[in-house]
Image (spheres, rainbow, N blue to C red):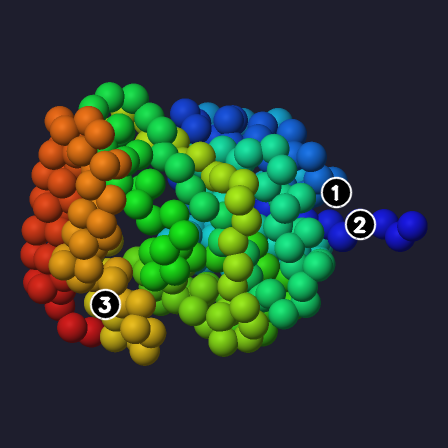
Amino acid sequence: MGSRPTVSVIVTTKNNQNTLGICLQSIVKQSYQPIEIIVVDNYSDDDTLNIAKRYATEVYTQGFERCTQRNYGVSKSTGEYVMIIDSDMKLETDVVAACVKMVEDNTKIAGVVIPEESYGVGFWAKCKQLERSFYQGVDWMEAARFFSRETFDQAGGYDESLVSGEDWDLSQRVGEIGKINRINQYIRHNEGELKLIRTLKKKLYYAREFKKYTAKTSSTNVKGQTGIIKRYSLFFRHPGRLFANPILGLGMLTMKTLEFLVGGVGYLTTQKD
């Protein structure tokens, strides 16, 4: 029996000492081997680098935005497959095994979506958890995170001019090469102690950069990604889930409405290059 292909898991970091250890432990504990862990840090000034060195195969420092970090990490990897993970994510034990099996069983599959669940502390984290539950299995909201190295290179990797929408952009280009499919195992996204004001500031920042993505893409998915009506119809299509806890449901809708308002201001006030 031949040796199994190596999977390179790329993790980008920037002052993530509170979540990185959990993330890397979940990769180390994967049922599939061999795995190499490539951490690319953006000049952290907390304990992130020390944590990374405890678990990672290689640790590098590379600045700019995460697209640059991710491409750099892939360039330094040796695996036949690459998986792109954020430092606030925790993988279920069989995630890597399921991804490898999917692409090995069907050579037409070019990218694999790993569905996400949110968790965290406090009311707004619970609202975000509820919101994210509506996106599972929705093609225009999910993006692939697992690819063969050959496919990643053929697609051109992440577009380093993008700060927002880069996951969708790469997934769409990979989808032109082959099929995108999803596994049943989950990534758990650690929202921490989510604060509404911090969420809105983050939304404003990314919205100001989103025009580069919408100007580039020809995908019809962008109508759902940016459309308020389509997003809300997705929520209200499942009223039992939305209002199982009425206060939580109303909180989630309030948070999402504020995000759309702030995002709209950011998008519309963006200066053209």
* Percent of width and height locating residue 115: 45, 46
Residue at numbered disc 3: 223
Q: Is residue 32 left or right of residue 69?
A: right
**At label 1, which amino acid type do we have?**
Pro
Q: Nearer the viewer, residue 229 or 200?
A: 229
* Percent of width and height locating residue 254: 10, 39
Q: Is residue 165 left or right of residue 254?
A: right
- On residue 34, the disc is 1
Of callouts 1 and 2, which one flags the residue occurring earlier in the amino acid sequence? 2
Frontmost of labels 3 and 2 is 3
Residue at numbered disc 2: 4
Indicate the quadrant where residue 220 lies: bottom left
Residue located at (33% from left, 49% from top): 135
**At label 2, which amino acid type do we have?**
Arg
Of callouts 3 and 1, which one flags the residue occurring earlier in the amino acid sequence? 1
> Residue 201: in sight, yes or no?
no
